[in-house]
Image (cartoon, coloured by chain):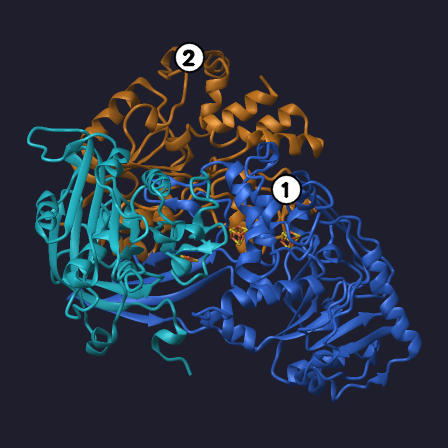
Amino acid sequence: MPKPKNKQTDPPRYPLRYLARASLPALLDSLRAAGYRCIGPQLKEGAVVYAELDTVEQLPRGVHDQQSPGEYRTQASEDERYFAWANGPQAIKPWLFAPRESLWQVARDEHGRLRFRETSPQVTPLAVIGARACDLAALRLQDQHFLHGAHPDPYYQARRESLFIVAVQCSHTAATCFCASTGDGPRAERDFDLALSELNAGYVVETGSQRGASVLAALPLAAATAAQRDAARQQSERAARLQTRALPGRNLRDVLFANLEHPRWDEVAARCLSCGNCTSVCPTCFCHAESEQPALDGAHSEHVREWDSCFTQGHSYIHGLTIRAETRTRYRQWLTHKLGSWHEQYGRSGCVGCGRCMTWCPVGIDITEEASAICGEGT
Amino acid sequence: MKPKIAVHKFSSCDGCQLAFLNAGEQLLTLSELVDIVHFVEAGPVAPDEQVDIAFVEGSITTPHDVERIQRIRSQSHYLITIGACATAGGVQALRNLVDGQQWINAVYASPQYIASLATSTPIAAHVKVDLELWGCPVNTRQVMAAVRALLFGVVPEIRRDSVCMECKREGNVCVLVAKGQPCMGPVTQTGCGALCPHFGRDCYACYGPAENINTPALVNRFAGLGLLPEEIARRFLTINNAAPAFVDAARSVQP
Amino acid sequence: MRRGDVSHPYLLHEAEIVTRVQEAPDIFTLRLRFSAAARQRDYTFQPGQFNMVYLYGVGEVAISIVSDPEDDLLYDHTIRAVGRVTRGMAALRAGDYVGIRGPYGRGWPLPQAEGRDVLIVTGGLGCAPVVSVIHYILKRRERYGRLIIMQGVKHANDLLWRERYAEWARQPNVEVIIAADQGAPLWPWRIGRVTDLFDQVPFDSERTSAMMCGPEVMMRVAVQQLLARGMNEADIHLSMERNMHCAVGHCGHCQYGGKFVCKDGPVFAYPQVKELFGVRGF
Ligand code: SF4
Ligand code: SF4
Ligand code: FES
């Protein structure tokens, strides 16, 4: 692996610390004292999902996950660890890019005059605990999309600015993970406030920001020993080694667009349900639809946006014509955008290798397999 | 003058009419906006009056129904079917797939008094339908949104996306992927708010087929979960039994 | 703190319909004025840009602005009633109010085309975005060379604004050529396919800029014809249409390969879109 040359531009380095597992509640307390509402992983409905976290007891202790295309199961174990699983159906995305959100309201008076009023973004500062390297890579892409254009999205922005991230370095990898091949993991290198590497009895803690450092200030920390640091590093390396899937290249843009008539598009369309699950769980997908919700009496109305998908008919509808009426062109839009035109839009692929689209695809379509079939191996 | 509305009933359980009757305050608002001229279950009876909007619940199952729906169509400007019976034959359309007369003979002591057609068919099989509201039953939001849009002078907007879209927005965990339940969400139309998966159980398709569905792919998946052909067929034939996409899917596994 | 437009890209401004003109059975023009004087004063746009126009309680649609950018009294939108929202808009009358946000997107490269000949190609029922170009050039006649307006229609009866074309044809250094696949009595123009038009009017491919809008099939044919006659790809500009919800590059609906039609377009130079132009499904 070539090393980036500009070492000197790296953020200031904080020393690695060690937090005993028994002191983890103190981290939550410290976050709350700093004004954050804690959001963390919990076992619910058979999966590790992110929800309001009041105590560490809610964390999925000893839970392991088993993932394969179209299948997700968890197993309980005697393991003391809280983060011994790869990832669940969602992580950060729904907390910033809300699945449904009101944008503005309008009232109409008896003269037909319209009064528009923006809906203020909800701004409780959140601390998300447990985000992985792939989630952070996806977050950077969502930031680019929603914040770095000519019209920053005020809702996303308000929540993003007050977001505190406690990342967790992956120690376990699912069979569906391929972040090593996209270059996005399994180690998170930046864009966290704190990052934990979970060991048998505690955590090696990396600090990524001044905010992170101040949250740590009140905690009973020790300097991380060389053995602890090695153990943390080794488990990340092992997680990378265990990944079996990979995309056939980092930039598939040209080869995808050179293969728009590849027979594989028909073949995958025969299997694809066109249900939109892949785009909903994908941490980088940004598409949303706007719609109007008028009050029955007609006196006021609300304008709402909600997650949409290139697999819906409405996505490509334009007065009387649906540009992508069948699954073949919808799947092709998804893949050529995700792995292709993202390069033009945001300078890199839209896939961070989290594997969610294949685990949570009800029929188990594997993006790495489809991409390889269309692009050829080893492009 | 206020627009006139009628609510008609054919073969059905009356459940869809509750979308109006249980609407609470909205029902009062509605009655200020429109004249409800015919709605037997709520009181007003004027079955032959000309109306702007006719809501029709229930499927066509008797010779008398066949005549009555023609009359309703001719006296209604805009006709909206509500629910699985009116839109896709309903549960009672299971009879379309068997010999109904045999059942009648087996069940009734004097079958000669039963004047019933061999099939239960959706309203659209008999007259032109302007709008179909799916669901078993439909909910208040659907019917009120339709009225509101028409009062604004525009066609009501119906999304025919899969239940999965709504299920993911709700933050539910997929019951098919995480529990191996034979969920019909991927082929079912949104509109219910992903109610069943929200409570941890598989969708049973009461909102009928979504647009652009791939039933063979789901049939395959269900077979992979270990469902027998008749179990798979039953997933498709429960509520919307005259919906062609579902009937075809069921026949493909159990001819 | 958040201030008006800069930080809330979705919020609309109220505008009053001052005049409504029925142009054809399903085409009408709304002439609008913002209710807030400051908004009316500060609003500027380029031909080819669009606004999101909001029908109360129903929704928004992207509509091209057809009035002249220097006319700061009223802003015109010519709308065809083809979809749910636009059909609803057809019922609007003078004195009614709508919501407006914009302008959005990139317009026609009119400053760059100064001193050159301009060839307009449009098809189908005629197309609002190029009408703004025609008006712009006619108003600044001395800054441009020849103005050639080409239009193909299926049937003679499909041509709207016949008088308008006749009027344009009377202007200095303007040529209007129209062809219908099928003629009709008293049809003053040609019978034949739009492709034939290009043989009728020789143009100097070096000094001509082409601007077109209309059905994509028509534009495809036109591009081929222009290229075959030696025009530079970069001198061909076209206005694209896609589903739009947000108009600011967020909602993803208008994507055309790597382009967002709302912010990278709607007017594109041909090389920007040629890779996918004509591929079904994008
Ligand atoms: S495309 Fe699939 S693997 Fe890639 S980031 Fe999205 S959900 Fe994850
Ligand atoms: S077009 Fe499809 S793949 Fe691209 S962001 Fe939208 S939903 Fe995701
Ligand atoms: S219209 Fe929303 S991204 Fe272009």
Which amino acid type is marked by label 2? Answer: Pro
Q: Name the residue at the right extreme.
A: A227
Residue A123 placement, left or right of A251: left
Which amino acid type is marked by label 1? Answer: Pro
The residue tagged 2 is B111
For mark 1, name the chain.
A
Mark 2, other Cα within 10 Å: few <14 / some 14–19 / many ≥20: some
The residue tagged 1 is A362
Where residue B134 sits: x, y (%)?
Answer: 41, 39
A287 vs C99: above or below: above
Q: Residue at x 77, y 86 (%)?
A: A219
Q: Which quadrant of the view contains residue A52?
A: bottom right
For mark 2, name the chain.
B
Where residue B170 sits: x, y (%)?
Answer: 54, 55
Residue C215 placement, left or right of A111: right
Q: Colour of chain C?
A: cyan
Q: Colour of chain A?
A: blue
Note whether residue C89 is visible.
no
Where residue A99 sits: x, y (%)?
Answer: 51, 59
Disc 1 and disc 2: Cα gap in Å? 47 Å
Q: Colour of chain B?
A: orange
Q: Which quadrant of the view contains residue B77?
A: top left
Residue C172's label in the rendered image is none
Where residue A315 sits: x, y (%)?
Answer: 44, 48
Which sits in the foreground, C110 or B191? C110
Which sits in the foreground, B185 or A209? A209
